[in-house]
Amino acid sequence: MRGAPMTPAGWTAGPDALDLPYRFEQRFGRRMRVLHIGNIANYAFVNARMQRRAGIDAYCIEPGFFHIMACPEWLEAPIEGDHGDDRTPKWSRVDLGGYKRPDWFVLGEEGLAFRYLAARQHGQAEEARKLQRQIAFHARSYAQDMPLPAGVMKALLTSRNPLAMRLRHYVKRLLRGPGKALPAAAEAEAMPAAGSFAIEPPPAVLPFIQRSALWRDTLAWYDVIQGYTIQSVYPAAAGLPNFLSYELGTIRGLPFEETPEGRLTRWVYRMSPEVFVTNSDCMPAAEALGLDMGHVHKVLHAFDI
C-alpha cells in the first residue's frame, strides 16, 4: 500500500502546495475532498477548518471520543458554567453563547457518525438532519445529560405503563439509527480477507475489518483521509490506499509495546502510505518501526491564528 496515490491517478500536486486546491479544481472540475478522522485536542477540526478556508472540501469525524478536548465548543465557544466531567461534558448545563457546531463536523457513535457523512455525500438533507438529532440524543444519553430529573428518568426506564414502554421502544430505535444492517453473507463478501493485507493484521484490528463494510464506501468518496493517532485504522481495515497517519507523539513508545494497543498502532503506521510526524523526537521511532523515511514527513502541530 505504501506509495499509493494520494490524489486521482495521473495527477501530481506540483511544487506549490498553497496553489493545490485551485489546480485540483481546475483539473477535475470539483474541490478536493479530505476527511480528518479523530479529533484529538481539536487538531483535526483546526486542520479541516483551515483547509476549508483554502478551498478544500474538508470534513472532520470523531467516532466515539466524547472528551471535551475533542469537542469544537472547547475551541470556539465562550463556555460559561459548569460542564461537569471533562470526559463527558454536559452541554445543556452551560451557556455556549449561541454556538453551533459546523455541519462539516460530526462527533458521535461510530455507526451514526459514518451514516451522517454518507447522507451528506448523497445530498440527503432530511436524512442528515435526522441523523444529527439521533447523534445529539445518543451523546446526551451517554453523558447522562438529560433534562428530566433522575427519579422521573428511572420511572420511565422501569415503568410497565404502555406509554412509557412505547417511549422506550422509540428511544431504542432512535439510538440504533436508520436502515438495516448488511446481511451476513453480503457483509462477509464486502469486507477484505485478513490475508489480503500487505502486513498481517493483529487480533485488535479484526473487529475493524469485520465492521469495515459499514464505512468503506463512505471513506472511498474522499481523495485523502487523514487519521490522527491510530484512527487511520478505519481506512486501513477497509483496504483503502488513500490515507495518511498524523502521529501526535503516538509512535514515541506505544507501537513497541507487546500489548493489543501496541500491536494495533504498529500495524496502522506500517500500513500507512504516508506519515506526518509532529514531534521531532519521534523520528528515531519512525526509523525503528521500519517506516520508509521517504514517506515520513515532519510537520508542525496544527494551529490557526
Image (cartoon, helix red, strand yellow):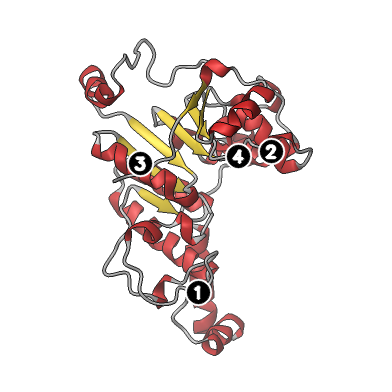
Q: Are marks 2 and 3 in contact (CB under 8 Å)?
A: no
Q: Residue furthest right?
A: 258
13 sits left or right of 136 in the view: left
Q: Nearer the viewer, residue 166 or 239?
A: 239
Residue visible at 71% across and 39% down in the picture: 262
Which label was assigned to residue 253?
2
* Label 1 vs label 4, nearer the camera: 4
Q: Is residue 121 above or below residue 296?
A: below
Q: Which residue is tagged 3?
A: 48
The residue lying at 45 percent from left, 73 percent from top is 83
Q: Secondary structure at mark 1?
A: loop
Q: Quadrant of residue 256?
A: top right
Tell me which amino acid carries mark 4. Thr
Extreme-top residue of the structure: 10
Marks 1/4: CA–CA distance:
28 Å
Drawn side of residue 198 relative to residue 301, left or right: right
Q: How far is the residue under mark 4 from the one under mark 2? A: 7 Å
Amino acid identity at mark 1? Gly
| Residue labelled with disc 1 | 84
Amino acid at dot 3: Ala
